[in-house]
Image (spheres, helix red, strand yellow):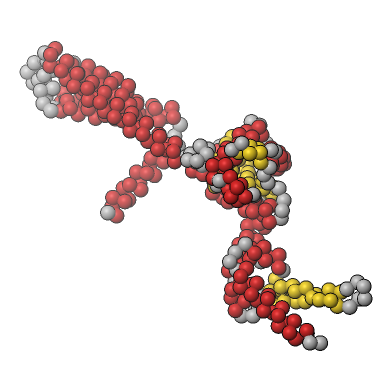
Amino acid sequence: MAGMSSVLHAWRALERRWQTWPQNVRHVCRVLTLGSLLALGTALVYVTGGTRYAYPYLMLIPVLLAGAWYTWRGSLLVALMAGLLMAAMPLSVETGEVQTPLNWMIRLGLYLVIGGFAGGLFERLRQSYLSVELASRTDPRAGLPNEIALEMDLSRWLKRPPRQDARSVGVVMVRVEDIGEIMEALGADACDELMVAISQRLTRLGPNLVGCYRVGGAELVLLFWPVGLKELERLACKAADLGEDNLVALGVPLRIQLVLGSSLQNGRGASPGSLIREARIAMLAASEKHRVHCHFQPSFARRSVQNIQLIARVRRGLAQGEFELHYQPKLRLADGRVSGFEGLIRWRDEHGNLIAPGMFMPKVENTTLIAPVTRFVMSEACKFARRHGAR
């Protein structure tokens, strides 16, 4: 099994390398291979004594290969060439006995039948493969290209040689912020129709837009080439204006809120996954900052990692008493007396340093962690009220 796995891995690597060759080069290689096999088969039939023996059937190898590469047209052409080559071969090289016309015509007909059948079968397989591949690259609900198509296309664009003007590949991720309300009010079909309408609207961005893809229920990715940083930011703002203009889904006019994040290829080392990830991080940063658009900055990624690590420590911090409730008095303006207190949650880490609430509370409020944090705040506030209520 290990040996078979190694062979398959090597074959797939060879196939991927083959696909990177220019189409004209691959075509020439195939034609040379077919010609060499026909010549080799003819020589082998002659050396082994003529067409009386079973070796003429080796000529079916290039016929089948032609069917696999060029479907029925290629297999019929190569079958005809193989049949004509066999017609020139003697029945027996040793005695010089020639074939009867009926003999080589039967063989020619056999080659043509086998070639036509094999070519038709390979064409059916190719059409089936193309249908499956197209389906795998298309969002089934909206009919838009999906994330698989995005990664394939983005990989192709990233392989282009760098331009002298330093413009490169740009990615903009677009999210409909209020998709949940639309889903609740109108259903999934309205969301799908809305995403299609937005994608159609965004095609007005100009010739630099080379693709629009749906990568989630509420997310689209726009692919631009060639583009610079200032130009990408301008296109992102224009996309926000176009997308937020009045749209219609299931006959209902809608006004939606978009948030966008963008990333730009820097150097030859960029990968499709890294560009998409950077655009998503920038989009999340824009959402947190309540902005329409943010372009990716390395600090966004560092902060995202820090936030993830910080949120993972909330339960432990509650258990170890790291959270505190500070109190800010509220004064009554009429007489200047204290009328109450406002509780302010604070988190002191293991080194005694205070962690700003903005670093953890927005995430806590959107997770189940809000329940234990709320219980802590209520408990501390009640204790404070009992201590100071009697004074």
Name the image quarter holding residue 112. Answer: top left
Spot the residue most to the right: 335
Please tell me whether residue 116 is drawn above or below residue 141 in the rendered image.
above
Left or right of 106: which side holds 262? right
Please tell me whether residue 340 is drawn above or below residue 85 in the rendered image.
below
Residue 71 in the image: state x and y as whole percent: 33, 26
Q: How many marks?
A: 0
Name the image quarter holding residue 67. Answer: top left
Residue drawn at point x = 8 percent, y = 16 percent: 97
Left or right of 378: which side holds 10? left
Name the image quarter holding residue 230. Answer: top right
Left or right of 293: which side holds 169? left
Relative depth, front residue between 104 and 163: 104
Residue drawn at point x = 61 percent, y = 80 percent: 320
Residue drawn at point x = 57 percent, y = 42 percent: 190
Relative depth, front residue between 249 and 154: 249
Please tell me whether residue 158 is drawn above or below residue 278 in the rendered image.
above
Please tell me whether residue 372 is drawn above or below residue 81 in the rendered image.
below
Residue 211 in the image: state x and y as whole percent: 57, 36
Residue drawn at point x = 92 percent, y = 73 percent: 334
Relative depth, front residue between 151 and 292: 292
Q: Is residue 391 visible?
A: yes
Q: Quadrant of the C terminus?
A: bottom right
